[in-house]
Image: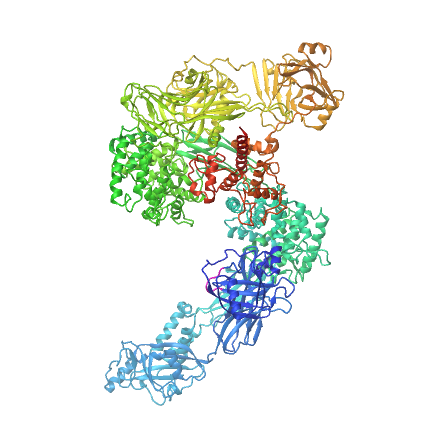
Amino acid sequence: MLSKMHRKAMSSLMSLVMVLSVLFTAIAPANPIFAANQGPVSVGLHIEGPQGLIHEGVAEGSNALEALQADLRQAQIQLDITNSAYGPYVSGINGIHAGLYNGYDGWNFAVKRQGQWIIPAVGMDQFELESNDQVSVYYGDFNTQLVQSISIQPGDVKANQPFSVTVTKSTYDWSSNQLINSPASGVKVTVGGTAVVTNPNGIAAFDKGVSAGNYSLEVTDYQATAAPGIVRATQPLTVNTAPAIPVGNLTLSVEKFTLGQGYSKEPVKVPFYEGENGAAVLTRVLGEDNIQHTGSTEERFYLSKVKDASSQVNVPNYIKEQMDADGVQLGTKNNEQWLGEFDYTPMSGWMYAVNNVFPSVGMSDYIPHDGDVVRTQFTVYGFGASLGGDEWSPGFIQTANKDALTARIAEINSDPNKAAILSNAVVKSLYDQAYSLLTNMESKQEDVDSALASLNGNVKPTLKVTGLTDKQEVSQANISFNVEATDNTSSVITPEVKLNGTVISKTAGAYNAVLNLGVNTIAITAKGVFGNTAEQIFTITYKASAASNAKEQLNKNLAYILKTVDKPKFGTGGGEWSVLSLARANYSVPDGYYQSYYDNVVSTVKDKMIANAGVLDKSKGTEHSRVILGLTSIGKEPKDVGGYDLLQALSDYDYVIKQGMNGPIFALLAFDSKNYAIPSAAEGKVQTTRDKLIKYLIDGESNKGNADQGGWGLSPGGKPDVDITGMTMQALAPYAQSNEDVKAAIARAVNWLSKSQNSEGSYTSFGSTSSESLSQVVTALSAVGIDSRSDTRFIKNGNSALDALMSFAVADGGFKHVKTGKVDAMATDQGTYALVAYDRFVNGSNRLYDMTDVDTEKPTITVTGLTNNQEVSEPNLSFSVSVTDNSAEVIAPEVKLNGTVTPKVADKYSVVLNVGANTITVTATDSSGNSAEQSFTITYKVSSVSNPKQLLNKNLAYIVKTVDKPVFGTGDGDWSVLSLARANYSVPEGYYQFYYNNVEQEVKELMAENSGVLDKSKGTEHSRAILGLTSIGKNPREVAGYDLTQALSDYDYVIKQGINGPIFALIAFDTKKLNIPVVPAGKNQVTRKNLIDYILEKEVSKGTANAGGWALIPGKADVDITSMALQSLAPYYSTRPDVKSAGERAIAWLAKTQGSDGGFGESSESIAQVITALTALGIDPNTDERFIKNGKSALDALMSFAAEDGGFKHIKSGAVDGMATDQGTYALVAYDRFVNGNNRLYDMTDVVDVPTPGDNELPLPSGDQPKIVIPSDNKDYIIPVTSADANKELTIEIPSNSNSKIQVNLPSNSSLPHIAAVKGNISMVIPKGAQIVSGDSSGLELITTNDAASSALKDKINTIIANGKKLDTVHQAITLGGTNRVEFNQFVTLTFTGMQGKEAAFIENGTPHAIQKFASDEAGQASGNNEYAYDSGNDLIVKTKHFTDFIAYASSTVEIPPIGGGGGGGIPQPTKHATISVDKRTISKGDVISATSVELQSGDTAWSLLKRALDSRGISYEYEWSEKYDSVYVQSIAGDGEFDHGSNSGWMYNVNGDYPNFGASKYTLQDGDSLQWRYTTNLGEDLGQKYTGDPVQTGKSSDKKTVIDVPATITENYNVNITKELKDKELITINIPNVKAKVILNLDEVKDNIPMITAIKGDITVSINKGTVLKSGEPSVELLTSLNTDDTNLQNLVKGSLKSAKTKIVKLAYAFAMGNADQSVIFDKPLTFVIKGAKDQSVGFIEGNTFTPIEVYESDAKGAEATKGNEKITYAFVKDKDLIIKTNHFTNFVSYSVSQQETVKPFDLKNLYADTQLISNWAMEAITEASQKAFIDGSNGKFNPQATITRAEFTKILVSILGIDVKTSSIINFKDVSQKDWFYPYVNAAYKEGFITGFTNDQFNPDEKLTREQMAVIIVKALGIQAGGQTPAIEDLDQVSDWAKADVQTIMARQLMSGWDNRFQPSNEVTREMAAVVAMRAYHYKNDAQKETTQP
C-alpha cells in the first residue's frame, strides 16, 4: 500500500517493486491482523481505476487473489497477473496497466476489517481473508491514500438545510510503524449533482443543502496527469423532508384553582407551527392519551376531561358560599383517574382563556398568535362564574389578570437553566410567592403586579469590556483591560475574570494578565442578584520572538517527555529519541531514570539478538544505530550491552545499505557520535568504512549531474525529500570542512531546502505539512552552522523555519504532527531534539550527535572496613566510604543496609545487621549521571537453635522406630522408605526386603482388581511406588510380574488427577531417567515434553504480569503445588528457557508469599515442599536472602515444627504427625544432599540397583575361607554376606573379560569379614573387622569394568591434568560400590598390577579428583587423606576409605621445543604446580578444599598459596602477623579457629608430609610440593605429629636471603631498589617474569659494595658477586630486557659481522639488553651470565652499532687468562649444557646458532590465534593438529571456538581431512551455491562423493547452522562406516530424527562423537571447536582403517 511510504519507510528495493506494481509490501503496520486459514469466505470487493470505478460486488475466496480472480472471471473483466521473484503481481485490469503516468504508479490492494485498514505485509496470494472483509484493489502511486472515515453533521440531514461532510484519510507513518489518521484536505465530495472540495480540516460544507432523497455520497480526487490522490470511497446518505418551522410561541397552562389543587400543567412556553389551532397545540402539549374530547382538533373540539388522579379538594370560600346559597352540595369525581365535566357539581367543566378573555369559539377555531397566554381552567361551579366570568357573564368575584405573571413563570419553567436560576434564594422566594398568588383565585391585582415587577428584575447583567478584542494576537506577555457589569437593579455586580481557568483580581481599577505562549482564554462572567449570568470569552494569542520562544518551549517539552515517558524503553516511541533529547539537553531526570531505560534495553537486546541470529532486526540496521545513539547520550557503552557489541552488525556494509539511504545515514551518525572504531566485519562480509558510507550518501544525491542537482530522497538518486535531505546533512556535517565533495553537496542541499520552503516557512512532503520535516531541517541547519531563525535563506514572508516549527508546538508541552491534530509522540521527540540541537548551536556547544562531550567515567568508590561475603558474629558494624571522580566535584555516596539508607555519622557508617545475610550497597553518582556501585554481602551468624543434620538423624531414627514394618502406601510406607534410603541411613537387616515383599503383595492384588492399574483414577499411586522402590535399588519395571511404569504411559490416565498426575509422573520417570513405555493402541502417548508442557500451561495467570506459581484447582497459586511443580521441572531448568522463566516467576512468588516467621502458612508440610524445591534448583533455603524474613529462614521455620524426640508436627500446637514427619524428613534429606553436593532428592541415578534374589544369587560356600568363582556367562550375580560371616576370609574370583555386575550385600555397622576380589590385573581387599559407616551397604559392585577408551572419560580426566602435562592413556576404569559414596572406617586396598609409575583418580557425582601419590604407604597414611596412592614394586596401590569409580592413567610432561628470543627469548619452562588441601576431618567437618593442583607463582609460600586458594573460593579466614616468629599466623579458616575445639586446637600445615617448625610465610614452596593445612584438636597428635615446641627461626627461608618477585602484570618500567638495608644480605634473588616492560635495577646506595644479586628471567640468569663495585656509568641499569630476535635490523647486524665465516644462515636464539642505552656500565670484576641449554650456540654483544662475537673458550680459567689486563673483559665458555658469559660491562647480548639451514620454528597455536585461551582443554590438541595441517583456519586472527559452524564450513573441513580433490567437474545445481562462492568447490566435491545432499533438489542452505545429528550423518557417510558396535545408552534417542537415528548410534559406537550425561543433544548446534575435534577423530579413524587394510 503506497501510503506506507509517505513517511519515508520505502527502501529503494521497494520503490522498484512498486514500479512493478507488486501486490505485497515490505513494511507492515504494527500488529497486523491476519486471519486463520479457514477456507473460502465471502467478502466485499471494489476495483477502483485511475478515473473511476471499474467493478464492485461480493466475492468468495480464501485469500485476496482468489477472491479477485473469481469475481473478475464471473464479471468477464480481463485480469493480467505476472509472476516475479517477489511473487505474483497484478500487471493489468480491464486493459489498464502499471506505469500509465510514467511514474511509480500501478495496482495495489488494502483490506478494511472491523472498520480499520490493514496494509498487508504479504502478497494477495498470501493474505488470508475473514468473512465480511472489504477488499479494495485500486490504481495509485506514492501520493494515493485511503479514506478512513466519512462523517456527516447533523446526523439527520434535512432537505435544503445546511450540512457538512468530514473526511479523514489513513497515512502510514514510517517512524512509529503505524497508520496515522488525518484530515483529507482538497478532495471532492459529491452528493447528487452538487460537489464541494474539503478545506484544510477535511470538511466539505454544503451551505444550501440538497433536496430530499436517497444519495450515494462519493469522495474522489482524480487527476488528469497522475494517479488519484485518494481511493474513491462512497457512503449512503438519506436527506429527509424538513419539519414545519415554528411561527411563534405562546404560554400554556392547565389550572385547577377552583378545587384548590393548583396546576395540572404548569405554565410553559410552547411553539406553534403554520396551520396549527389551539386544539392541536393543547393536544400536542398534553398528549392524546391524557385528554378526552368531543369533535376533533380540526373542528368542534371540546375538552371534556383531563387525566388527573388528585382527590383532595379545597374549594375557595367564595364558591362554597355561592353553592350554599344555591343549595348545591359538593359531590365527587365520576372517575378517580380523570377530571372533567360534571365532576363535583352539575355545572363544572373545562374552559379556556386567551389573553385573559374566554373566547366565544371552541379551541379548534382559535388560531394562536405569538405571545398569546392560553390558560385552560377547570370551573367547579357556575359554568365559569367560579372563574370570575367576564363582561358578558359576571362571576362570583372579580379575579385579577394573571397573564403577564403566568407568562413570566412560563419563561422560568422553560429555561434550560431553571435549576440554576432557582438556586438563588432570592429568586426562589419570588418564584414561590408568584406561584402562591397565581394559584389563589382571590389574589389582589396589586399583589400580582408587584410579584411580576420583582421577577422582572431577574434579567442578565450587561458586560462592558475595554482593552480586549476577541481573537487578538499580541507580541507581549503582559496585557491590561477594564470590565464593567450592570443590570436593571441598583445592585453592585462584581465580575469574575479568569485567565486560562485561573481567577485574576482587579488592581488599581484594571485587570492585568500575564499570557502563556500561544493561545490563551480570558473568560469574564457576571451574575445578577437573581442569579442570571452573562459571559464573554476572548481568545488572545501570544506570539513571542522565536529565540526566547524556542528555549521556553524546549523546557516545556522536556518536562512533558519526562511526564509522559516515565518508563523509557527500547524502541522508536517512548525510547531512544526521548532519552537522547533529555540527555543532550542535560535535563534533570529522576534517580534511576536512565538506569531503568538501560535495563530495559539490555533485556530487549538479549531477546532480539538471540531471536535474530546476532542482529536486532534482520532488515533494519537503524535499530542498532538508534540504540547506539540513545546509549551514548547517557554515557553507556554500546560495545557491551548484555554481552553484545551493537556496533558489530553495522560493520557489515551490505546489511547497512539494505535500508537504502536510511541505513548509511544513521550508521554514520552512530559511529561518529563518539568516534567509535568500526569493528572488523565477519568473514565473507563486506567491511563497512566511513569512506564507503560517505561515498554512498554523496553518490545518492538527487538529480546528480543535472542542473537541479541537490538534496536526497528515499532511495539513492531518487526525488529529493525534505526529511531525508535533513538527515543526510546531519550525517555528513562532521566532514563538511574536510571533504570538498561533502561541502559542495551540503551547499546544494541547503539551496534546495531554501527553495522548497513554503510561504509559511514550512515544508510539504507527500501532500502533508508536518512538524517532523521542519524538525529535521532545524537539526540539519544547526549541525552545519546555519541559524534556522535568522538566516534569510530560511525566512519566507517573515516566517523562519524555526517559527514554522514553533507553530506546531502545544502550550503545555509537546508537538503536533499536523496543526489540526493532537500532541503526537513522534512529532514531540523530533521537535524536541531539534530544539535541543538549536539550543546547543546558539550556545556554542557540540552538535546534537557529537557526543564526545558526554562524561562516561564512573566515580571510584573506596570502602574501608568491609569485605564481601564476610561472616560476623556481632550485629554492630562500622566502616568508612570515600568517593573520587575525574572532576573536582564533591560526591556524597549513598549507603544502604538491606535497602534502607544509612546516614554518615562522624565520618563513619554504622549499621546493625539482621540475622543471616545482609546486603550493604554503596552507590555514587556524579553530575553527569555516571553511577558506580559496590555491594557487600555480610552474614551475621548467631548460634542456631537446632542443627539440621542432628535433627535429620533424630527423625530418621524416629521413622525406623515408628515405621518398623513399612508397607505400600502414603503413610508408613513409600515416603518413609524414601527418606531413609536417600539419607543412606542404616536400617535393620531385611528392612527394605520386608517393604518390598509388602509392595509385591499389594501390587498383585490391586493390579488384578483394577484391570492393570493400582488405582483407576490416581496415577500418583504408581509414581509414589516407583519413587519408593527406586530409592532402595529395586526395579519398578518388574514388581510381581508388573511394570509399574506402564500405566503412566497413558497421557489421559496421568492427567485425570489434574496437575498432580503430571508432576509425579515426571518425577518418577526422571528418578533414573527411565524410558517411557509405549502406550497401548488407542491411547495418547506420554512424553516428557507433553508432561512439561502440561505443567507450564497450568501456571497461574500465565501470560499476564501476575503470572507465577501453580494451583491444584485453577485460581490462586498454592505453595505446595508450586513447590512440587518446581521439583518436577528441576532437571530441565538449565535446558529449557521456558521452564527457567516459569521457575523464576514461581520462586519470586514463593519469596513474596513467605510469612514474617519464615514459614508458609500454618503447617510444616508447605515449608517442607518449598525446601525440597529450592534445594532441587540449587537455592539454599537457609542462606538465600529471598527466603529469610525477619532473620528467619525457611529452614529455621521448618525446624520450629520439630518434636523434641523426633518427628514433625502438622501445626505447632499439635502432636507429631505421620505425613508431616515424612515430608519434613525428606525435606531435610534434600537439604543435606544439597549442602554436601550430592544428587537431588529425586535424582536417583546414584542408587545402585539391587538384583532381586533368585537365580543370580550366589550363596557363600561353607567353611571359614569360602571361595567363589564367578561363572563366565556375563550374568549379574549377587553374593549375600551377613554379620554371621564376620570371622571368615572370603575370596571372589571374577573373569577378567566379564562385563557383568558382581555385587555383595554387606551388613551395616557390623564388622566385615576379610574380602578379597580379583579381576584380571586388578584386586581389591577389605580388611577383616572393617565396618561400613556411611552409605547403602546392599548391592555393592565389585570391580565393574568401565570403558577406559571413552572420550567423555578422557575429557573428564583432562580437567585434572596439571598444566605442562598431557594425558597419555587411561589404563583402567572400574566401579567399586556404585555411583553413590560408601564409606569405611578402615582403608580398603586396591591394587593395579604392573602399573608402577601410573597415576590414580576417582570420580564422584560426575566430578574427577586426582588421588595424591606418595613415596610410600607410611607417607600416605601420615597425610591424613581418605585416599592416597603409592608404587609398590611394579604395582600401583590405591588406599581408600570410600567406594566410587576409580581410574588408573598415565600422563607425561609436554615437551616444548625452543622458540627463540622473540621478545623474551629462551625455552619456556613448564608451569610449576603444587597441590593444596585444607581439611577439618579431626572435628568431622570433612574437607574445606579437597586436594587440588594449582599453579605456583614465583616465590609462593605456604601462606601465600593458602591465601590465594581461600580468596578464590570466597572462604573466610583470619590471620595476624607474629613479630615473634616473623611470619603470618593463621587463626581460623571457614569459621573454625584456635581454641574453638579445646585449648590445644588450631591450624597446622605440612609440606610433603613434613610439619616445618617455622612460620608459613617463611616456607617457600617448590614445584611438585604437596601442601596440607589441617585442623588439630591436640597440638597435632590427632594428625600423627608430636608437638616439639614453638617454631624456630631457621628453615628454608632466612633473614640473610631476600626474594624479590617482579609482578607479571607490569606494563611500565619497574624499579628494583637495592637499599643500604639490603647490603648485608647473603643473597638477593630477583625473579623476572616474561614481560615486555623494563626492569630497572637501582644500585645507587650500594654501588661501592654490591651484595650478592642473582636475577632470573626464563633461561637466563645473571649474577653479581658480593663486594662488586660499580666503576663507571649510571647506577640505574636495565636488567635482562628482552629484544626481538625477529627484528630484521638486528638479524642483518649479526649476519653482517659473520661475512667471513663459512656459514650461510644465522638463527638468533636469545637477545637481551643490560645496562643503559646512553653510556657503558663497567664493574670492577666480571659478572656471570648463564644461558641454560645453549651449549651449542654462539654469542656476541652489540655496542654502538657494531656486533662483536664473543670467543668461547674451553674453560673459565682459559677465558680469564686470555682477557687478563683488558679494560673490558668479555669471554664465554660451556659448562655441562649451559653457555656461560663472563663480562665486566653491560650492553646488549645476542646468542645465535649457525647452520646450513634454518631450524623450523615450532608450531605454536598462540601465534596463530589471538583467542587461544578461549579454546577448551579437550579441544586444544585437535585444533592444534587441524590448524597445523591446514584443515581448518580462523578469521581475523581468531579461531572463535564457541561460534557455531555452518554446513558450508564443515563441508570444507571434511573435504580437506579426507583429501578429496576439489578440482573436479561441476555437477551440482543448487541455486544457493554459486561458482563464485568460496565454498563451491568443496560442496561440489562432497556432493560428488555422495556424503552431502541438499535440503531440496535445488537448495543446499550453505549458511544454515550445522546440528549434531546432521554432523553424525555426514561423518558416517563420508567415512563409509557400517552400522554396528556396542552403542552406549542414549537417553534422548527419541529426540533424534528418524533419518539420523542409525547413524547417531553408529558414530557413538565408534566413539567419533560423544554426548553429555548419556544424552546426545541431537538438535544442538555444532561449535567450531566441537567440529574440529570430531573432524580430527574422523581423520585418524580413516587413516587407522587404511593401515589395517594394508597389513598382512
Q: Nearer the viewer, residue 1866 or 1570?
A: 1866
Question: Residues in magenta?
Answer: 128-133
Q: Is residue 247 left or right of residue 1779?
A: left
Q: How is the image coloured?
A: rainbow
Quarter residue 1066 falls in: top left
Q: Is residue 38 left or right of residue 87?
A: left
Q: Residue 1512: where, in percent of width, then height? A: 49, 29
Q: Residue 1641: where, in percent of width, then height? A: 64, 20
**Residue 327 shows up from this direction:** yes
Image quadrant occupied by the N terminus: bottom right
**Residue 148 shows up from this direction:** no
Q: Residue at x 47, y 41 (%)?
A: 1962
Residue 808 shown in magenta? no
Quarter residue 1845 falls in: top right
Quarter residue 457 falls in: bottom left
Measured along the vertical axis of the image, is residue 1871 above or below residue 893? below
Q: Is residue 347 left or right of residue 856?
A: left
Q: Residue 361: where, in percent of width, then height? A: 38, 88
Q: Nearer the viewer, residue 308 or 1116?
A: 1116
